[in-house]
Image (cartoon, rainbow, N blue to C red):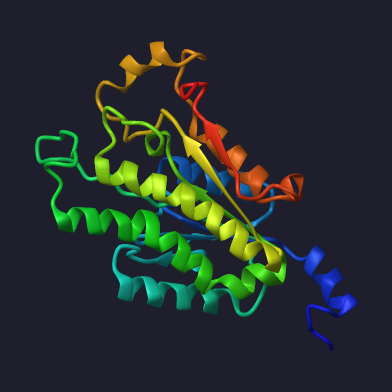
Amino acid sequence: MPNKPGDPDFVERRSNARKTVVLTGASRGIGHATVKRFSSAGWRVITCSRQPFSEHCPWEAGPEDHVQIDLGDPEDRARGIEEIKERLGGAPLNALVNNAGISPKLEDGGRMNTQNTDEDDWKKVFEVNFFAPILLARGLHDELALAKGAVVNVTSIAGGRVHPFAGSAYATSKAALASLTREMAADFGPDGIRVNAIAPGEIDTAILSPGTEDLVSKIPMRRLGTPEEVAKTIYYLCTEMSDYVTGSEIHINGGQHV
């Protein structure tokens, strides 16, 4: 049976096949909500995180579609990409969501700024927040191209302004990721791959910094966002509803940036 991208029967089979998304940083918060959103729409979700699959995670396929990978370790990252490719088995990849991110704190929980952040911490943050997204996209390029798929990079409101809690390395890495998103959109576009970003503001998750509630009065909508609201926007950027959207960064912050 012919099985080439140019074959009409192959195109029809691909359009009728179950769609697949690879999601990093799937172990909590926005990652959990995103898994639920795609799973409810019938997608296969291949999750990636530093932790092994937990029995408390909200998706059924779980262990069979979970890849334990340390995105901050170049060698383990390369191994993980190969494992994801093996899991796909040459099938198209409809979406890659680069949600994983780290923002280290001082020992007392304080903000790490440009003067007190060690060089090693800068490098660790950029390995996960900046290098992992582009290397995953490059490593899975063929599978994404086969599906005319989408890449969504998760940046942050901290990438565009000094934030009271987010550290300098985190903020700088997210600003760099926003710029990288535009570069990727230009480079991946000719292959039919769309690349966009979302920039969440204050989202109500279990890892909120103390004092976040004090920011609510400065948000025009006067409330925190929910992980589900972020997940819905990610889903939009991975579907045909956004077929002609690429190189964009959507702010999800209740107007906090205005």
Residue 113, compared with residue 118, is above or below; it is: above
Image coords of residue 169 (percent x, y): 26, 46
- Image coordinates of residue 88 in percent, x first then y, are 59, 74
Closest to the observer, 21 or 201: 201
Residue drawn at x 67%, y 43% as measured from the top left: 236
Q: For this rendering, which residue is in front, 140 or 180?
A: 180
Please name the residue shown 46% across and 41% down the image.
Answer: 30
Q: In this rendering, would 127 be left or right of 245?
A: left
Which residue appears farthest toward the right when viewing the image?
A: 8
Quadrant assignment, res 250: top right
- From the viewer's perspective, tell me whether residue 210 is left or right of residue 19: left
74 left or right of 223 in image: left
Asked whether residue 63 appears in the rendered view, the answer is no
Q: Position of residue 249 (x, y in %)?
A: 56, 41
The residue nearer to you, when weighing 52 against 202, is 202
Q: Tell me the quarter of the picture where residue 192 sits.
A: bottom right
Residue 235 seen in render: yes
Most extreme residue toward the bottom is 1
Count every numbered label the image shows and give the total. 0
Q: Using the image, determine if residue 81 lies above or below residue 247.
A: below
Residue drawn where x is 27% and y is 29% of the image: 209
Question: How far across and how far down the image is residue 252, in percent?
Answer: 53, 31
